[in-house]
Image (cartoon, rainbow, N blue to C red):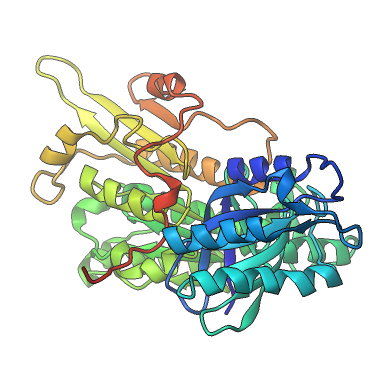
Amino acid sequence: MNPIAKIPRALLLAALADLERPHPFAGERLGFFSFRQTLDPVEPLLLCFEYHSIPDDQYLEDYSVGGRIGSEAIQAAMSRAYNTGAGQLWIHTHGRTGIPGVSPTDRENGPKVVQSCANAQPKMLHAWAVISEQGICGQVRSQDGAFHPLLRLAVIGWPMAIPAQREIVYRTFRAKAKDRGRIEDRYERQSFLGGGAQDIIESARVGIVGLGGGGSHMAQQLAHLGFQDVVLCDPQQIADTNLNRLVGATVHDVRAKAFKTDIAARLYRGLQPNAKIDDRPLGWEAKVAALRRCDVILGAIDGFAARRDLEAFCRNHLIPLVDIGMKVLRPENEAPEIRGQVILSLPGETCMHCLQFLTAANLAEDVQVYDKDPQPQVVWPNGILASSAIGYAIGLLTGWSGSSVPSCRMDYRGSQMTMSPSHMASALNGHRCTHFPLSQCGDPRYQKL
């Protein structure tokens, strides 16, 4: 078992702030996360959705350890596990920054607390760990009673920390002035992204859903940047009408009835011959096992219902989604206008429903039934929107600009050649999403009534 703990950044920062508070007598504070989990037995996700502080009076005066909690605190965790079916992650911190390690006391006491939670709810995973903003170190107890290392943390927010962060930090430390085995000058001109940015790029997994005009641009740009692990999702074969905008496609591809995934993979391998590419010509619904482990998903699909379903999947697995779309308005007796948008959907924060991009009315009508009523498309708006989506993804993964979170929605107006923050997004600044509660994350479970 190779588990990953995923925690929204705002939730992690709130937990660390609580753990750093001084206690009347204990040297360190402790707490619990409640988490949902995925059903993958090899690489389960521990999807943390709520933090539980331990009251001062539930600590024991034991100066032989940094902090020790009494039976009341453990019973409260057992009660949560039993009543809600949520796994419990017992945590403390040795500092907000850096990659944490564990002490002999941690190794002795952590499994005991976890076993108590398992006694109350044996069907779920439970865990203990030392945690920081950059990493995690602990153990997960599986349903069979075995303990497995918990060394991978994904912090979901702006910026992210990805599960490979621990290895990246160690590798950078070991090879500060050494050749990393990569042609450095190839990426020299994007070194402003940060000292470890290229390692992050090469370690991240990115999914692209939809490989038409927008998605083909995204695939090309990911390849140029150096991404080595991509999941390409599209079940369609290329048509002659795609050639005006699908990057990498040729007339021969139309004659050969090539799949869009094959075209994107061919272009990708021309730039990154050693990349790991899932190019099976399938829709995203058939690739959930691969997409579940993505750090970011880029959406370029048609229709409101399709967007709704993809966003729900990403929210269930705490995966940031960057969605793009465009349409051409042709009002009677007026010049046509190109409108488009780029939306950043971060778990726990503003979603497409919050932004009123997805509404009951447009979901009911779902007016863009693409195969029955093809919409006008041209290459340059797709390129502009796709480039903006890649910008969001790079900002999420590297935090290169050091800036605050950009607008969660940018609107494109083709006649004016402008990209501007959405007025709706500005009005919702600081809004917490109620359409996808964090407590509802995780794989769906079916129970007999």
Residue placed furthest toward the top: 333
Residue 142 visible to an observer of this rendering? yes
x, y percent for residue 77: 57, 59
**Foreground residue among 63 and 201:** 63
Q: Seen in the image, is 376 located left or right of residue 315? A: left
x, y percent for residue 218: 45, 51
**Foreground residue among 2 and 82:** 82
x, y percent for residue 86: 47, 61
Residue 14, quarter of the rendered image: top right
Q: Seen in the image, is 33 located left or right of residue 360? A: right
Q: Seen in the image, is 321 located left or right of residue 54? A: left
Residue 273 visible to an observer of this rendering? no
* Residue at screen point 57% across, 80% down: 1
**Foreground residue among 258 and 432:** 432
Residue 425, quarter of the rendered image: top left
x, y percent for residue 402: 70, 35
Residue 43 versus residue 6 in the image, above or below: below
* Residue at screen point 28% across, 28% down: 338
Q: Seen in the image, is 54 located left or right of residue 220? A: right
* Residue at screen point 78% across, 39% down: 21
